[in-house]
Image (cartoon, rainbow, N blue to C red):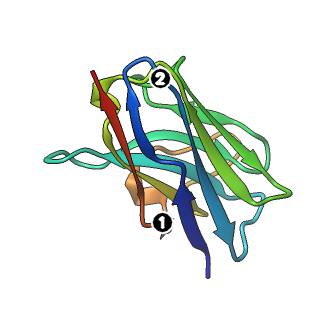
């Protein structure tokens, strides 16, 4: 069983930066993908960024390209999301997730359907 625990959320002004972390316990194979999702009040949860653990291939939502960077530290079994140039519209609960389906070196999904394990979330609030 995989357990995911997010940290690093908080409040920041527009233009600022935050780094989210997701500590994973349990078996995460190199064939897994891991991703970050977010859900703002009144909106559906959306995929933000994902990474293929075995090869480092990444996938980003258009809304965060060039501003967010996803990475994974194999030794620490920890996923990160470096967020820069934050905007008020980035305000949301951010979730970490792991997938072993629909994931390969050429396919790094951003859809919820692909992800099997989820963390509890960490809140990010960006003020203007």
Tell me the residue that label 1 is attached to.
Answer: 119
Residue 52 in the image, given as x and y percentages of width and height? 68, 46
Residue 107 in the image, given as x and y percentages of width and height? 60, 42
Give the answer, above or below, for where 85 lies relative to 26.
Answer: above
Tell me the residue that label 2 is attached to.
Answer: 16
Residue 1 in the figure: left or right of residue 45? right
At x 28%, y 28%, the residue is 89
* Residue sitting farthest toward the left: 42
At x 67%, y 58%, the residue is 32
Place residue 25 in its image quadrant: bottom right
The C terminus lies in which quarter of the figure?
top left
Q: Secondary structure at mark 2?
A: loop
Give the answer, above or below, for where 48 lies relative to 116.
Answer: above
Give the answer, above or below, for where 74 lies relative to 107.
Answer: below
Residue 50 in the figure: left or right of residue 53? left
Q: Secondary structure at mark 1?
A: loop
At x 40%, y 58%, the residue is 113
The N terminus lies in which quarter of the figure?
bottom right
Question: Counting residues from the N terminus, which is met first, the one under dot 2 or under dot 1?
Answer: 2
Place residue 30 in its image quadrant: bottom right
* Residue sitting farthest toward the right: 75
For the residue pair 106 and 55, the one nearer the viewer reads as 55
Residue 60 in the image, given as x and y percentages of width and height? 51, 31
Residue 123 in the figure: left or right of residue 101? left
For the residue pair 43 and 11, the one nearer the viewer reads as 11
Residue 68 in the image, given as x and y percentages of width and height? 54, 28
Number of dots carrying numbers: 2
At x 47%, y 18%, the residue is 85
Q: Tell me if mark 2 has few (under 14), some (14-19) or many (20+) residues whose alpha carbon lies within 10 angstroms of its own.
A: some
């Amino acid at each position: 069983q995989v357990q995911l625990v997010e940290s690093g959320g908080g409040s920041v002004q527009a233009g600022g930066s935050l780094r989210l972390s997701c500590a994973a316990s349990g078996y995460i194979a190199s064939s897994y993908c891991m991703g970050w999702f977010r859900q703002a009040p009144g909106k559906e949860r959306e995929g933000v960024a994902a990474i293929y653990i075995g090869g480092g291939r990444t996938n980003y939502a258009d809304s965060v390209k060039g501003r967010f960077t996803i990475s994974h530290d194999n030794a620490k079994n920890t996923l990160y999301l470096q967020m820069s140039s934050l905007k008020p519209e980035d305000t949301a609960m951010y979730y970490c997730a792991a997938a072993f389906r629909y994931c390969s070196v050429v396919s790094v999904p951003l859809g919820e359907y692909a992800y099997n394990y989820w963390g509890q979330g960490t809140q990010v609030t960006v003020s203007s």
